[in-house]
Amino acid sequence: MKKTFTLTICLLSLWGLAKAQAPVNLGFETWTDVVAYEDPDNWGTLNFASLFVQGVPTTAEKTTDSHSDSFAVKLVTKPADADLNSFGLDTDTVPGLMIYGSISSETAGTAYTQRPTGLQFWYKYTPVNGDSAGFLVQLTKWDNIQQEQILVGQGAISMKDVVTTYTLGDVPIVYEEAIEPDSLFIILFSSFDALHLLGSNLTTISGQPGSTLIVDDIAILGVDTPNAIKDNAAAAFDFTVYPNPASTTLNFKCNNYTFAQGALTFDVIDLTGRVVQSVSFNNTQTTTDVSTLAAGMYIYRLTDKTGILKTGKFNVAR
């Protein structure tokens, strides 16, 4: 089923963000002075609001606390001594937020035509009072006939735990359409649960002042071939996961798969990016026990020894 690109961020349409191009500066090594603050090149932040409204703080800054090389980005949620309604924000707290790619009309995102398997990044996080950080990636394609963005694939995770040393975050991409995208869009928050990122109106973002997310070395995975999720191998067989939602047992079935590359591995990934189950199998039909998993949405990733074959999602209901 075709899905339109539903991420609503009207506050960010007030200024020009990164121009469409191949992704660069994913390690945050280059920055530009913008009057009273610095922004990482090719990224947009909420720092611009501090130039127009007195009492609005800057919430994204350069830090030497890096995973590699010289710099990383630090996003900090801060209180605002100002009325933010003019920016479309129904809150008195400003999250650390940054975005890669423009979000206006058909040029939304950065020009990008590959189908990566996911993104990884290194991070530290200090939440306040149970706050959550978020990382979202979406791939879209402009439909000239319908005059709308079509959602091709997306992935998101939440970060809720205190992380004081650099930790690898993993964001698998689940594809909704079997078409080539034309744009890539990345957004990070120091406050906002990724459970609410997909299809949300982000004008209700708030958060706990002091929550701090440090990010470095974002990597796009599986782009060594035009279609990173191995389309030829994947097309050779059908893979079905059922029931959805599941409560105690999840079944997965392979049709027309020869296991020429050996056993397959079925990983279950929660919305914090953790692999919570991993099952290897070499039969056409297998089950796994999900009775101990918390209710909610999960991502699955099917791999063989050559790489990722398929990704998808399912729900656990109680």
Image: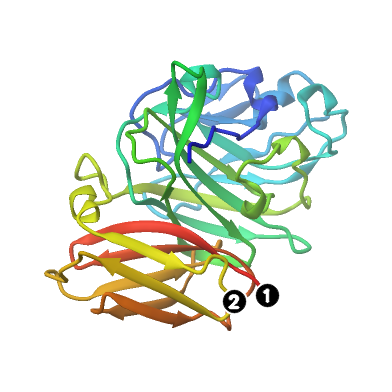
Residue 65 image position (x, y, % from top left): 50, 53
Instruction: Specify which label sits upstream in the sequence, 2 or 1.
Output: 2
Circle 1 — which element? loop
| Marks 2 and 1 close (CB-CB < 8 Å) | yes
| Residue 40 pos. (x, y %) | 50, 32
Mark 1 is surrounded, within 10 Å at the Cα level, by few (under 14), some (14 to 19) or many (20 or more) other residues, namely few
- Residue, disc 1: 318
**Is residue 270 among the parts visible in the rendering?**
yes
279 versus 60 height, above or below: below
Front one among 199 and 67: 199
Model colouring: rainbow
Q: Give the image location of residue 212, x and y in percent.
A: 65, 53
Number of marks in picture: 2
* Residue lying at the far left of the rendered structure: 260
Label 2: which secondary element: loop
Give the residue type at disc 2: Ser
Is any atom of residue 170 visible in this view? no
C-alpha separation, residue under disc 2 versus residue under disc 1: 6 Å
Residue type beneath disc 1: Arg
**Image coords of residue 168 (percent x, y):** 44, 62
Q: Residue at x 67, y 41 (%)?
A: 200
Q: Residue at x 28, y 79 (%)?
A: 281
Relative depth, front residue between 155 and 179:
179
Q: Which mark is residue 210?
A: none
Against 279, is 96 above or below?
above
The residue where tag 2 is placed is 247
- The quarter of the rendered structure image containing the C terminus is bottom right
Image quarter of residue 296: bottom right
Picture layout, residue 192 above or below residue 285: above
Q: Residue at x 69, y 60 (%)?
A: 127
